[in-house]
Amino acid sequence: MDARAGRYTDPDAVLRGVFGYHEFRPGQRKIIDAVLAGRDCIGLMPTGAGKSLTFQVPAKILPGPVVVLSPLISLMKDQVDALIRTGFRATVLNSTIDWDERRARLEALQRNELELVYVAPEALNDGLRSQLAACRPALLVVDEAHCISHWGHDFRPAYRQLQGLKTQFGDIPILALTATATRRVVGDIIRQLGMRKPEGFKGSFFRPNLILTALRKGEGRTNREDLLGMIRRHAGETGIVYCISRKSVEDLARWLRGRGVKALPYHARLTDQERTDNQNAFARDECDVIIATIAFGMGIDKSNVRFVIHRDMPRSIESWYQEIGRAGRDGLLSECVVMYSWADVMAYDRFNEAVPDPELRAEMRTKTVALLDLLQSARCRHQALVAYFDEHIDECGGSCDRCRGGTIRNVTAGEATAVSRWPTTSALQPEVVDLELFDRLRRLRKQIADREGVPAYVVFSDATLRQMVARKPRRRSDLLSVTGVGKVKLERYGSYFLDAIRAHGTG
C-alpha cells in the first residue's frame, strides 16, 4: 500500500487531526511552508519549541519520504515508537539493526510505504547514501545541525559525511535544525551542507517555565546536602544531575543511593548495555534521577523532566542552555540549578590540554570563562542568557533567582503555591486540583506504556493529563478537544482514560 494514498494537503489539518494540537507554535508554520515550497531552511529553535513538528507535518504532505539525520541512536527507537502511536509509518536505520531487517526496511522505503526514516550519521556510508537516494526522498532533515561545525559546542566528525547529500539526493530541500548556534556556527552549517539562500527562523530563547538559580560553591554550603534536598522536593518526579567527571558521577550516584534515592549513573565508560538500561529506566520513570556527564542527553525526548542540576559548571553558555533545555519540554514549570566556581574553569583547562589546535583550545577557554562571568553577574539570568544568542528581552520578573530575590531554599518547581504568584509563570502550570485523579491517570499511563514497551510520555504528556484532570472529559468528542489527543491516540487509548475518569467520578 502506498503510504501517500489519501495524504493530507493542509498543515493545519495535520496538526489537529494527527497530533491533536490546536495551533502552531511560533515559527513552526513558517518553516513548514518553506520546506513544502521546496526551499532550504535553517531553524534555530530552542529545546521545547516543537522543532520535530517542522518536519513531521510535511511528512504527511510531501510526495516522498522524509530522511532525518539524528545523532543519538539510543533515542531513535523511542522517537519512532512515538510517531507510530500518532499514526505515522516510520522506521530507523542504524548500526543496531541486523542485515535482514535493514534490507526489509529499505525495501519498504523503496515501495513508498514509509513517511519518515531516521538515520544515524555514523551509518551513512556510500552504499546507504545510494540506497536512500534511489528512494527519492522529498526532504532531508539535519537535526542537531551544530554538530557539523568545528566551532559548535558538540562537534561530531561523522556529521562531515553529510557533505554532498543535497546534490546526491536530487537537489531536495534541506532543513537544518539546532537549539544552540552562534552566527559563526550558522554560517558553517550553511556552507557544510551546501544550502542555497536558505529561509531562516530564529525562535525566542526565553523559556520562562525554567526557573533558573545559580549557586557559588562553598560559602558554607554542603553541596551534596543541597542536591539531596532538591531531589527530595521533587519526589515522584524525575531529573538529571550533571557532573564534570566520571568519578564524580559514580561517587554521587552511590552517595544518593545510600540515602534512599533511586539514582543511576551515565557516562562513557559504562558498557553499552549499562548505558541503554539506565537511559531506559530514566525514560520510563523507573528512577528518580540520572547522574551523568555530558555524554547523556543530546536529543532527549522525555517531556516531563522536572529538574536539571549542574553539580559542576558546564563547559560553555551554549552547553548550559542545551542541558537545561532538557527540562520542562512539556511547557510546565521545571527547576534548573547550576553550581559554579573558578575551580571548574581550571578543571576544563586540564581537559582542554588534549586539544591539539591552540586556536580552538583558546576559544573553548574563552567560552567557559564567559559562562562564569554570566553566572557571577547581577543581571537577570534569562536576560543575560538570551543576550548571548543576540536576543533582547525585559527582565524575567520571577523565573530566576536574580529577579526573584531568593535562593534555592524558597523556590522549587514543586511548590505550586509559590509559583502561582509569579506574574510571568503562573499561566504555565495549570493547577492540578484533583491530585487523586492525576495520580490515577499517571498510573494508567505507566501501565499502558510498560505493556507496549515504551516510555510513559509516548502515550500522553503530563500537560495532556493535566488537561484531562481539569476538564474531566466524559465522551470521545470531549477527549478529542484535549491538547495532545489526535485521532489515532483517541482510538488507541481513549477508552482507557475515559473509563478511568468516569470511574473516578463515581467512586
Image (cartoon, rainbow, N blue to C red):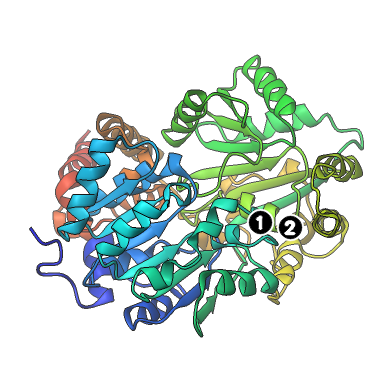
- The residue sitting at 18% across, 52% down in the picture is 108
- The residue sitting at 31% across, 39% down in the picture is 441
Q: Nearer the viewer, residue 422 or 30?
A: 30
Q: Position of residue 369 (x, y in %)?
A: 86, 55
Q: Nearer the viewer, residue 47 or 354?
A: 354
- The residue sitting at 86% across, 62% down in the picture is 378
Q: Amino acid at mark 2?
A: Ile
- The residue sitting at 23% across, 62% down in the picture is 18
Q: Are marks 2 and 1 in contact (CB under 8 Å)?
A: yes
Residue occupied by mark 2 = 317
> At numbered mark 1, what does the secondary structure look like: helix, strand or loop?
helix
Q: In the drawing, does residue 149 fall left or right of residue 128?
A: right
Residue 244 higher or lower than 114, as above or below = above
Q: Quadrant of residue 8?
A: bottom left
User: Which disc is residue 321 wearing?
Assistant: 1
Q: Position of residue 119 (x, y in %)?
A: 39, 51
Quarter occupied by the N terminus: bottom left
Q: In the drawing, does residue 174 fall left or right of residue 109?
A: right
Residue 320 higher or lower than 112, as above or below = above
Residue 414 visible in rendering = no
> Disc 2 versus disc 1: distance between alpha carbons?
6 Å
